[in-house]
């Protein structure tokens, strides 16, 4: 398998899952500014949308969109229990959290990273994120993991929370969320993926 990634981007989530799953893989670095690969090829020939992650299977087929890739990888190793079995109520709970993180958190960070975003738009995005993080804080104050047991949803949340301090939303303001983040950071697979991408915890 090949994972097309950019250090610290949302592609870190499937990268961590690859390590959690013990799946051999190759990393292909993408420059998101130039949309080029290290060998100079146009990344848009791999993903016309120009963003990561992309998972390329050994037969050449490709998957895009992080939550779909995360679930595909977890399903390859059911014994690792990274995601509940398909068709179970618990699986739909995890899918609900993946959707929430993708639409309510991940996308609301976009204006804060986009050059040229007005201060008014940034303030609106921060306000929306604060409300969503308050909701997650309440959940994590009652249980260690989003869906009760550790899952790929927790990994995705960990990746998104790595962006908080960079955009003026101190993680320390949410103690339960910060504890969750530290819990994830201590996992060997998380440490391995961060090291591979030359990232700090």
Image: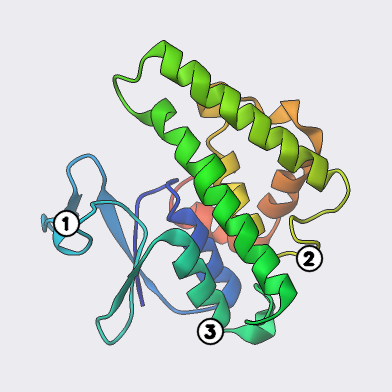
Q: Residue at x 81, y 62 (%)?
A: 148
Residue 173 drawn above or below residue 188: above
* Residue topped by disc 1: 44
* Residue topped by disc 2: 149
Residue 43 in which image quadrant: bottom left
Q: In the rendered image, is residue 191 in sight? A: no
For the C terminus, which image quadrant?
top right
Residue 170, x across and y down, in percent = 65, 25
Q: CA distance from mark 1 to mark 2?
A: 37 Å
* Residue topped by disc 3: 76
Residue 16 in which image quadrant: bottom right
Left or right: 188, with 22 as reference point: right
Q: In the rendered image, is residue 87 in sight? A: yes
Q: CA distance from mark 2 to mark 3?
A: 19 Å
In the rendered view, how is the structure colored? rainbow
Residue 119 in which image quadrant: top left
């Amino acid at each position: 398998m090949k994972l097309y990634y950019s250090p610290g981007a949302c592609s870190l989530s499937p990268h961590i899952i690859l390590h959690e799953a013990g799946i051999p893989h190759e990393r292909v670095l993408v420059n998101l500014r130039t949309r080029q690969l290290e060998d100079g090829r146009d990344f848009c020939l791999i993903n016309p949308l120009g963003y990561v992650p992309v998972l390329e299977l050994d037969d050449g087929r490709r998957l895009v969109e992080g939550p779909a890739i995360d679930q595909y990888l977890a399903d390859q190793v059911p014994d690792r229990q990274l995601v509940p079995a398909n068709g179970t109520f618990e699986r739909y709970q995890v899918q609900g959290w993946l959707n929430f993180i993708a639409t309510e958190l991940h996308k609301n960070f976009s204006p804060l990273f986009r050059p040229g975003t007005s201060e008014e738009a940034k303030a609106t995005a921060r306000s929306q994120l604060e409300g969503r993080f308050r909701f997650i804080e309440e959940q994590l104050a009652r249980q260690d993991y989003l869906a009760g047991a550790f899952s790929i949803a927790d990994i995705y949340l960990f990746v998104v929370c790595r962006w908080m301090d960079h955009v003026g939303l101190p993680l320390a303001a949410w103690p339960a969320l910060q504890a969750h983040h530290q819990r994830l950071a201590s996992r060997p697979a998380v440490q391995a993926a961060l090291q591979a991408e030359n990232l700090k915890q």
